[in-house]
Amino acid sequence: MSSKEIALKIFQQGVYRLAKWANFTLPEGCEYPEDCKAIEEAKKLFQWTDKTKIDSLRLLFDFVKLDKGQDWEYYWKPDAIADSTPLIPYPCNRKPTNDDLDNLKQQIAKDLTKLNLAQEDWQNLALLTLIVEKYGSFISFGETDIAFSDLIRSTAAVAAALGENTEATELCLVAGDLSGIQKFIYTISADGALKSLRARSFYLELVTEEVVQQVLAELNLPRTNVIYAGGGNIYILAGSNQVQVEEKINQIRDRFNKWLLEEFQGKIFLALDYVTLKTKDLNTKEISQAWKEAPRKLAKQKQRKFDNQLTDFLKCKPSYEPCKVCHRDDTNDLKQLSQEEDSVLACPTCRKMYDLGGKLLKVNTIIRSQQNQPDNSKDSLIFKFDEFKVSYYLSPYAKTVAQNSELVLLVNNWKISNYQFRHCPNPTSFFLGQYAKKSSNSEEQNSTIRANELAEAADGIKRVGYLRMDVDKLGQIFANGLNENLTLPRLAGLSRMMTYFFKAYLNFLAEYRQINTQGFNKLTDKEHQNLLFIYAGGDDLFISGAWNEVVEFAFDIYQAFRAYTGYNPDITLSGGVSLAVSKFPLYQAASESGEAEEAAKNNGRDSLGLFGQVFKWDEWLGKVEIDFVQNQDKDYWKIIKNKPSKPELLGIFPFVSLLQQKQIGVEYSRNFVRNLLNAAQIQERMLEEIENQQNQRQEQYNYETQDIKYYLHLPQIAYTLARLPKKVLNNEDFRKSLKSPYNAPYFRAIATWIELLNRSENDTTTK
């Protein structure tokens, strides 16, 4: 029996169990299949028996513990994933009732009745996989923190891997890593770079997908054996035949790297290897050893990049005028990047990326084919290897008639009817962060918005904002976060939920802000339409947009992610935002937002770098606790006899929000900003002078420094308050809070934010 047939049997059993739980009788021809030896062993490993029950699902993130750990219990609402839902499912701290579970049962029965499953459907692994995922992602099966869908998928993966040798005590974990992504994506320069950049990130998504496809094909594995694929990283569970696994992945790695070297001059490299793990360890914490060993083996390959292609790498090739976009100089086929008169000269790859970037407004279907098709198709990407050629064709339609195709990827799509064989073969779910505002340029119909349009749409100063953000300590979360509870189904659950958030739910957060941010701290309630996702996947993102919308969206993402992960203090994000004029080199803007993100990481993580300042998210959002502020200089506050109480407004967000609501006007705003900045500058200058006085005793230095940091602002603030309009001065909380020493460190950030929001001139001459 083939591995795909084994996986099919398990998913048939999974759908059967779901239907039985929902009190729904499947039609004739959809019988419960018997176990084979491989299935028996996999079920035994994960303790799946006839008595295993479906119930409500605890939030798996609750069990992650690195330094702090979770003090609360959260549950997922028992629900099906909607066909194309705009709603982000946030867990709640109330255990679902039997009525909640009954509602899901009724929905399953109703939907399966409509589906009218036929014998052909019962043999459709893609369809059954989708049914299990759609209805089984927010209910448990056995252990309260293991989702039904994750246990079914993990069982299928292990059984498929055991199919060739049911007595195997060891299996192989294939791991891959595309390195050089930063260099490939972020180091381009030219007009129209935004859409070129977006195309490049999309291109790498397809390169990762193609690696997955070739590994699965060469090792005869079903899609269910992909444990994780995103952000250029791949983990696939394979069989026990190490000789075969090593031979096949070496062939795939050499094939890709030869192509990558030729296509991109070695900027991108594929590290691909495997580690062995004991079969019994798949359901114990020992699986973490393989999860840690795999990156170490890949790192060794990355230290010897292209060692099998050295002959090609060292060949003396003629040098030509470099491409003005990617700077490669190994081709003389340079042409104008676009039809505009002042367009730069670019290589074929960059021209293709530019053209493709203009067509990526929304992709709903991606068709993979090895059939000979015209190379000049504008809506396709072609990978040419020595042995064969692979084409990926893009379509904006969810239902696309796919002829001569081996695979159809359905983007962010959970609609069951789309996975039936009636219109396309071998459909597969494919998640993609792809939100983009449409350009208003009439000459570029259905094209993504340009940088100059984003700047013009901004409030206040006309700037484009760039946001980079990623999960703190993600590697540790996967390898060590679950401690004794670490198992393959839980690893699969963590990766699935991270993928959902960064590749699917972020699209909904951008497009449907109001319904996904209820209860969040927000400066405005308007929808954020002027955004462009350049990259969102794995655990990180790079997003551009009108600067004020990017800033607000950063706070939306953080609050959504924290709610989504049950506010676990060990699962946080760090991010950085840079602002630039529309003509500013995009690679430089990306570098600056990356530096801001790195500064946030260096601030103990869980922070945001913005306006040249770095604070914890709670300090920006105005959720900071008084003990946090005092702990920053705890020795100082110990000697203060009459420590001030916590002000009503503490942090940055509350002041900016209040002043925006009061609409104090440009002139008042400028005066307020000027005085607040003066207070900050005086503090900073005096602190710098004290730090240079090395002959003072450490104790004197500390106390004098903190006196200036927290109290020097009072005279300047009194002067500032006296010149504000009455509608602001009448707010007693505002007056007292602005004088509070706890708010003194935030003056520069508050003033900068207000200034940028109220800048009336169209300043586009400087960055």
Image: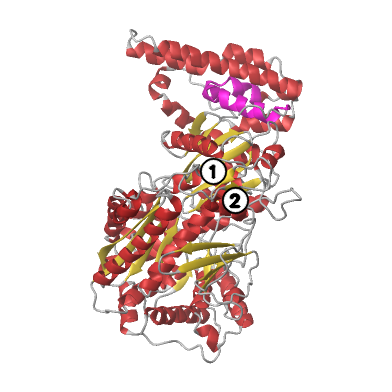
Numbered mark located on residue 325 in the image: 1
Q: Earlier in the sequence, mark 2 or mark 1?
A: 1
Question: Where in the figure is residue 57, as x and y percent of width and height?
Answer: 47, 64
Magenta-tinted stretch: 733-761
Tell whether 503 sits left or right of 481.
right
Q: Is residue 67 above or below residue 156?
A: above
Numbered mark located on residue 192 in the image: none
Q: Three-letter amino acid code at disc 1?
A: Val
- Residue 764 seen from this side: yes
Q: Classify 10 Å Cα crowding around label 1: few (below 14), some (14-19), many (20 and above).
A: many
Q: Is residue 153 above or below residue 334?
A: below
Taking the view exactly as shown, the residue that stands out farthest to the bottom is 28
| Front one among 410 and 306 | 306
**Dominant secondary structure, magenta:** helix
**Total count of labels:** 2
Question: Where in the figure is residue 295, as x and y percent of width and height?
Answer: 31, 53
Taking the view exactly as shown, the residue that stands out farthest to the top is 695
Q: Is residue 761 above or below residue 515?
A: above
Q: Secondary structure at mark 2?
A: helix
Q: Is residue 748 magenta?
A: yes
Q: State if disc 1 and disc 2 touch (CB < 8 Å).
A: yes
Q: Classify 10 Å Cα crowding around label 2: few (below 14), some (14-19), many (20 and above).
A: many
Question: Where in the figure is residue 498, as x and y percent of width and height?
Answer: 47, 56
| Residue at the image point whose x is 44% and y is 51% from the top | 264
Residue under circle 2? 354
Tell whether 626 sits left or right of 459.
left
| Residue at the image point whose x is 46% and y is 59% from the top | 207
Q: Is residue 204 magenta?
A: no
Query: Split into 4 quadrants, where in the image is the N terminus?
Result: bottom left
Q: Three-letter amino acid code at disc 2?
A: Tyr
| Front one among 402 and 742 | 402
Q: Is residue 651 above or below residue 211?
A: above
